[in-house]
Image (tube, helix red, strand yellow):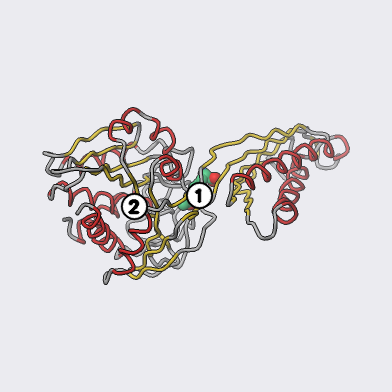
Amino acid sequence: MYTIEEMTAIRRHLHQQPELGFEEYKTQRFLLDKIGEMPGDHLKVEKWRTGILVFVEGYAATQTIGYRTDMDGLPIQEETGLPFSSHHEGKMHACGHDVHMTIALGLLNYYAKNQPKDHLLFVFQPAEEGPGGAEPMLESDSFKTYQPDWMFALHIAPNEPVGTVTTRKGLLFANTSEFMVHLRGHGGHAAYPHLANDMVVAASHLVTQIQSVVARRIDPLDSAVITIGKITSGTKENIIAEKADTEGTIRTLSQEAMDLVQKHVRKICAGIAASFDCDVDVEWGAQYKQVWNSEKVTSFMSFSEKSKDVHFREAAMAMTGEDFGFFIEKIPGFMFWLGVDSEKGLHDPKLTPDEGAIPIAVNHIIQYLDEEMK
Ligand SMILES: CC(=O)N[C@@H](CCC[C@H](N)C(=O)O)C(=O)O
């Protein structure tokens, strides 16, 4: 078992070198080096793009259990002021994947030294934040070779105290759909708006109108979110912008609601094109399947409820997305939240997860797997 100091050093090293989806080269190298230091007698290690699969052979296996961590960081400039802040300008592990990877390495290190009864598959998956590594990984021959019988994963919960574990049966995380809208008019002089076609004004109307979809098209007893996270337009205060590009994400609790929201986004874009006499093109990006915890979660919930080492609470549904949903659409499994007690939340430049959660998670998962492998 890694010591707390070793796990802290691993987490801090990973924290300093965040990489975006499918660019996790240094991360992969570091993880492979760490895995290379472990006894390798019952391990099979395989690279998949910028990810890694590690099969741990059980000594009397009747099942294969999968454990997945994500690997990528986000395009955020860190503002924590921590001495081990990101070395990569404009990139940060602001969603806790550094903590997730450390926990996975801690578990793998334990099972490399203590051969498990059943087979284990450690899935180090790239590109969770986008464009999505889970779906192509699941379809890969490498993954199919070791196909687990069931799988699980965790996500840090900044709003929960350290030592807390939460999850629920059924829907845990939402369906997601990235969308990009490209508006094209024509530019001109700020003093002659009637001779130009201003895409800053068109994009502003688009953003405002899109908010009405949730307010006026979704059953108030259902739920949906549309967030436009990025708008790019214009060059200078006195030049009318000829183009605007927006990037957003839709979150819903069902595929039906997603289809409905997408239909109305398309209609609003067509309306903007007509009323502003411009070209409006909608491009759909990554679409993640909801995270639907299978019956398998019940054994984890009852184990956690009885545990003296963690405090278990039933989770509420969340509008976060997770491409782990692709895995557990095909393979029974579940996700759970791990309390890390950070004043600032996920995707915040000041997120500071408490590292004390790392050994708690490693110990809890080992104890749970011991039960499941009896
Ligand atoms: C846990 C978490 O924060 N996940 C991300 C997943 C992103 C999905 C995709 N890039 C999108 O924006 O729709 C999240 O933002 O919830």
Q: Is residue 11 left or right of residue 177?
A: left
Question: Which one is closest to the eye, mark 1 or mark 2?
Answer: 1
- Which residue is painted at 47% across and 49% down in the image? 291
Residue 60 appears in the picture as rendered: yes
Residue occupied by mark 1: 321
Q: Spot the residue most to the right.
A: 194
Q: Amino acid at mark 1?
A: Gly
Q: Secondary structure at mark 2?
A: helix
Residue occupied by mark 2: 100
Residue 211: image location, x then y, percent: 71, 52
Q: Secondary structure at mark 1?
A: loop
- CB of residue at label 1: within 8 Å of ligand 1? yes
Q: Amino acid at mark 2?
A: His
Q: CA distance from mark 1 to mark 2?
A: 16 Å
Q: Is residue 6 left or right of residue 163?
A: left
Sequence-wise, the earlier of marks 1 and 2 is 2
